[in-house]
Amino acid sequence: MRKSKLYSMVLVALLLSLTFSPQMATAAEIPLRASDYIDVFRASAQPIGYGLVRIDFQIAGTSVMNQLGASEIQIKEKTGASWTTVRTYRHESYPDLMGQNVLRHTGSITFPGIAGRTYVAHITFYAANTKGSETQVITTSSVTAY
Amino acid sequence: MQSKDQKFYKERFAKLEVEQLEELIRQDCLADGSLLNTEQTLAILEIIEERRPSGVGEAEIDAAWDSFQAHYLPLVETNEALYDNKTSRTKATRRRFVLPRLSWVAAILAVFILSSSLFAYQVYGYNVWENIAKWTSEIFQLKTPVTPNGDAGEGMFPDAADPRLQPLYEAMKELEIPTTLAPTCIPERFEGPGIIETSHAPFKGVINGFILEQETLMLSFDYNTNADSMYEKDDSPVTSLRINGVTYYFMSNNAQNRVVWSVDQYECSINGTVTYEELEQMVLSIYER
């Protein structure tokens, strides 16, 4: 009886998936969020030895932007099953995080971590011109310092 | 040079096993350095290094010391903690106890949905294994493997036929990015020479921008890295065009249209206030030399 119940559930699942497969083939429906200010962005985290973790990023605007870069970078450390913010870099204190009147801006920070610990960087990108501004947030892949 | 005290302590600690010496160091760390003085600590470390050599060379020790002085010591001098005082904990993931029967069903359901999605992709003409690209309604992501930077052969750096593109071609040559990747012409309304910005490792590449009052055209050519590029886009569908084994992805980001493609170790894009037809013309011009 138990087996037949499992088989019938599997059959229902199969029928459901075939029914909804056209929808599955299209893009997932997520609220509209294009950008009039940001064209493309990328970021990476890399352990470089001696406990250090290097965070690199690049952002391109949709045109020349008065301000373009990272307004904030949060370094988060893995503690058990959660992530704890251990250090925050803001462009007010680290001016190289932000470019002025550029099409594209590239920046990096080197975080003095602790060997053996796992980190991610939570980066808030920012682009602004005379018409307005926009932000976008990205989290890098996790890396373990060595 | 060892101090007299250090020699004395070394003779005393030499009677202990390495494990006992390591335990002493550990206890001293836990006691915030109050158990052992400097000479005692150095004597213990010397004995451990003699009995169990770490294999670390002088050069590496010097490099580690230089790194410490550059990145960690300044924090001490400015009375700054390694970690910010205020730490915020993000929401912990909760463990849920799921009945075994439900997890079985969920796993089977997931497999069927994934396989049917792949089937549907094939039906609609997308070869998911060929083009490692993925997108949602708001982000287009081009994922390409990083390959070693091999030597580009001769004939990979032709000059620009369109003088407006000459600065771009020059910058690409300097960065050793084949100019055969670039279009040979752009819409006439974009007057040259445009803005050129180059960047170096880890994001090595060039961007050329033609900025008019209400119109923009930007061409960018970059080396692939291990960082995936995230292109902003609206919810219009992504279309693709395949030419000479290269897949060109067309998409829109509100008032701008864009084409993105990847060849070998290079990622390329053209975006701006241009129509899809103009983008296609620029793409086709790559092959007209």
Image (tube, grey):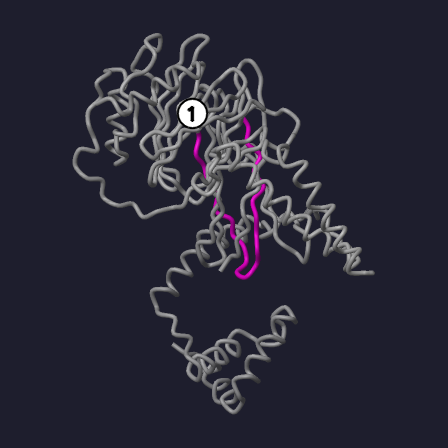
Nearer to me, A121 or B240? B240
Is B80 positioned to the left or the right of B100 in the image?
A: left
Nearer to me, B193 or B136? B136
The N terminus of chain B, quarter of image? bottom left
Q: Is residue A104 magenta?
A: no
Nearer to me, B239 or A20? A20
Is B270 positioned to the left or the right of A65 in the image?
A: left
x and y, in percent, of residue B154 in the image: 16, 36
Q: Is residue A118 magenta?
A: yes
x and y, in percent, of residue A105 in the image: 44, 30
Is B164 positioned to the left or the right of A124 in the image?
A: left
Is A71 positioned to the left or the right of B2 in the image?
A: right
Taking the view exactly as shown, the residue that stands out farthest to the left is B154
Q: Residue at x 80, y 58 (%)?
A: B99
Identity, as a three-letter code, of the amino acid under mark 1: Val
| Number of numbered discs overlaid on the protein picture | 1
The C terminus of chain B, quarter of image? top left
The span shown in magenta is A105-126
Q: Main secondary structure of the magenta part?
A: strand
Taking the view exactly as shown, the residue that stands out farthest to the right is A1
Q: Quadrant of residue B185?
A: top left
Q: Label 1 lies in what chain?
A: B
Nearer to me, B141 or A112? B141
Q: Residue at x 48, y 82 (%)?
A: B5
Taking the view exactly as shown, the residue that stands out farthest to the bottom is B15
x and y, in percent, of residue B206 in the image: 34, 29
x and y, in percent, of residue B29 in the image: 61, 71
How packed mark 1 is, by other alpha carbons closer than 10 Å (few <14, some 14-19, many 20 or more), is many
Q: Secondary structure at mark 1?
A: strand
Name the residue that disc number 1 marks.
B259
In this rendering, is residue A83 above or below B245?
below
